[in-house]
Amino acid sequence: MAERTRRTPLNRERVVTAAVALADEKGEPGVTMRALAGRLGVEAMSLYNHVAGRDDILDGMVDTVFAEIELPEAGADWREAIRDRTASARAALKRHPWAVGLMDSRRRPGWATLRHHDTVLGVLRAGGFSVAMAAHAFSLIDSYLYGYVLQELSLPFSGPGDLDEAAGDLVRQMPEGVYPHLAEMAVRHVLAEGYDYGEEFDFGLTLILGALGPDEA
Amino acid sequence: MAERTRRTPLNRERVVTAAVALADEKGEPGVTMRALAGRLGVEAMSLYNHVAGRDDILDGMVDTVFAEIELPEAGADWREAIRDRTASARAALKRHPWAVGLMDSRRRPGWATLRHHDTVLGVLRAGGFSVAMAAHAFSLIDSYLYGYVLQELSLPFSGPGDLDEAAGDLVRQMPEGVYPHLAEMAVRHVLAEGYDYGEEFDFGLTLILGALGPDEA
DNA sequence: TGCGTTAAGCTTACAACGTAAGTGCGATGG
DNA sequence: CCATCGCACTTACGTTGTAAGCTTAACGCA
């Protein structure tokens, strides 16, 4: 009787949540069935009572990330709404750096993902976009968002002004004059004081949002 | 003496090339050291005489994809040049669908990658872009490109007008009216005759290229 | 000609992975 | 009180990347 609540019951959500935390700490390959089970105080095979397998867990993880993105309010100005939701999405994707890498292998969107996409489309439609134009805008904005984060993650430097070790090696190995424009960019721009790649994002988003608009045709 | 050329000698390039072919056929997880060795008529451990390990092979594969992208000619109009190279890049990334998924985990660009980036920067600089503006443009264009391909690959349909099985299930399971805008988009746009997601790409690229330009400041 | 060095194959072995199969226990419902 | 069943457990298998060591063929030089 003293052990009535000896352990909180497992379920799919608890498994996926633990998997997200584990991936945040050790990266996506760190999410092994045994490690995940260990963190939940359970043996590996017990997880199969709640999820279909590792792949199912990865699907759930991606959906969890989408669930973290703040949905825009329906009433607001569409540009404002898209800007907010894009910032929130970018933050979520950087908080869980494994998410972008998983996206291209997941073919089954979860309900949070669907809900998110539906809401964004709703904002555009409410802003006066035709169905076709909303599709264009949606594709363009999200392509930019995902692609930007993808590049951000594979950058050889992490913060303003500091290259990491690998990049340092690379630059040092670069024979003089072979990649002149790359060298110019590195020296005169990226390594210049105060540069932050994060600000690059706003430039592109502003350009895109400025050029986009509901069609009058 | 009859066996002088009993087998063509192995080297890093042959290993990586075989890995690319294997990944094209079986996907990235299909590239196992044993399978790869088998295709080269060799045992798994022999590969380690030519590459540092599986990770090194993956690095090489990504660089191979960049090597396949046609470099723009230096003299041409920058918009034309960027458009051509973007089309070539998109084709290469679709020819090797595993490449985008690998990009975010590779931190060591190969020389083909560097050469490619350098040439693109060169085109922009020659077109009159300042260093800072070239960085903006480069980031924006490539983000769009990679993000677009990423989305394209995770789409639940493959060609115009046909959903694949998983997507069919999904649409059927969608409770009426829960994702109204998604449903509208599916019915009135995506599933409409003649729709091809590939054309979506040009819309975004044209918009971006139209809004970009060398700075006069 | 013969010998030492070296490059690049080979075999063996191991820990860690995902998961199929089957066992056992504790709570719940008739 | 007993049957059922959900859920965790143990065991086991095939596959993975790769460390360690062995073998052999080619080559430089005495």
Image (tube, coloured by chain):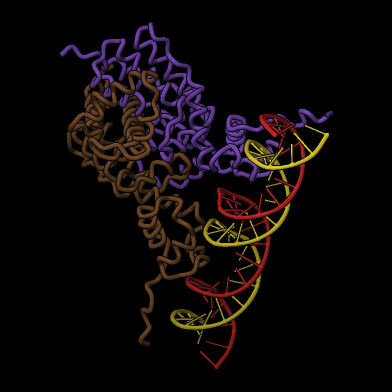
Chain colours: A brown, B purple, C yellow, D red
Figure quadrant of the N terminus of chain A: bottom left
Does A165 appear above or below B9? below
Q: Quadrant of the C terminus of chain A?
A: top left
B124 left or right, relative to A16: left
Image location of residue A37, percent across then percent down: 45, 65
Instruction: Let me know if residue A58 appears in the view.
Output: yes
Q: Left or right: where does residue B3 sit relative to residue B144?
A: right
A127 over C28 or under it: above or below:
above
| Image location (x, y in percent) of residue B14 | 62, 30
What residue is at 25 percent from the left and 33 percent from the top? Answer: A197
For this rendering, which residue is in front, C8 or B204? C8
| Horizontal relation, residue C14 to residue B179: left or right | right
Q: What residue lies at 40% left-to-right and 37% top-to-bottom? A: B107
Measuring from the top left, give residue B44's x and y in whole percent.
65, 44
Q: Residue furthest left?
A: B217
Give A24 or C27, whichever is nearer the viewer: A24
Q: Position of residue A182 (x, y in %)?
A: 33, 22
Q: Is residue C9 left or right of residue A60?
A: right
Seen from the viewer's position, the closer of residues A28 and D2 is A28
Q: Is residue A33 above or below residue A127?
A: below
- Asked whether residue B178 is in view, the answer is no
Residue that appears at 48% across and 22% down? B194
Marks counted in the figure total 0
